Image (cartoon, grey):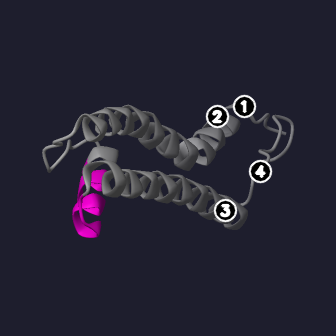
Amino acid sequence: MRFEKRHQPILPVERFLVRMLRYALVSAAIIFISLLIGVLGYRHFAGLGWVDSILNASFILTGMGPVDPMKTNGAKLFAAAYALFSGVIFLSAAAVLLSPVAHRVLHFCHVEER
């Protein structure tokens, strides 16, 4: 996935929308894989059911905090590691999603008029 260079014209809107869709899919994949890691971790370390694992992983991934108290040291350590991981992942997924927009704005500012 390459962006156009400074000397190249701005991408037409139709191709830009396709690019945005591709980046949105990559961002969604990052979120999905991260959510899966959280769900499996909460199932294994905290012994939660599937629905409770999804709920806890979703809340941590979006920065809202845990729902269920962690009872074992393993569960607490996993929750701490997953919270740190989630903070980085959520911001990274947002950066991936917004990078085509940021590039387009910067590219528009640098296009030489002919």
Q: Name the residue located 64 percent from the left edge and 34 percent from the top edge.
A: 106
- Which dot marks residue 25? none
> What's the distance in space between the residues labelled 1 and 4, CA to CA?
21 Å
Label 1 sits on a secondary structure element that is: helix
Does 55 appear in magenta?
yes
Hey, what amino acid is under mark 3?
A: Val
Q: Quadrant of the C terminus?
A: top right
Disc 3: which residue: 13
Disc 4: which residue: 1
Label 4 sits on a secondary structure element that is: loop
> What's the distance in space between the residues labelled 2 and 1, CA to CA?
6 Å
> What's the distance in space between the residues labelled 3 and 2, CA to CA?
16 Å
Mark 4 neighbour class, 10 Å CA radius: few under 14, some 14 to 19, many 20 or more: few
User: From which residue to which does the magenta span run?
Assistant: 48-59
Hey, what amino acid is under mark 1?
A: His
Disc 2: which residue: 106
Disc 1: which residue: 110
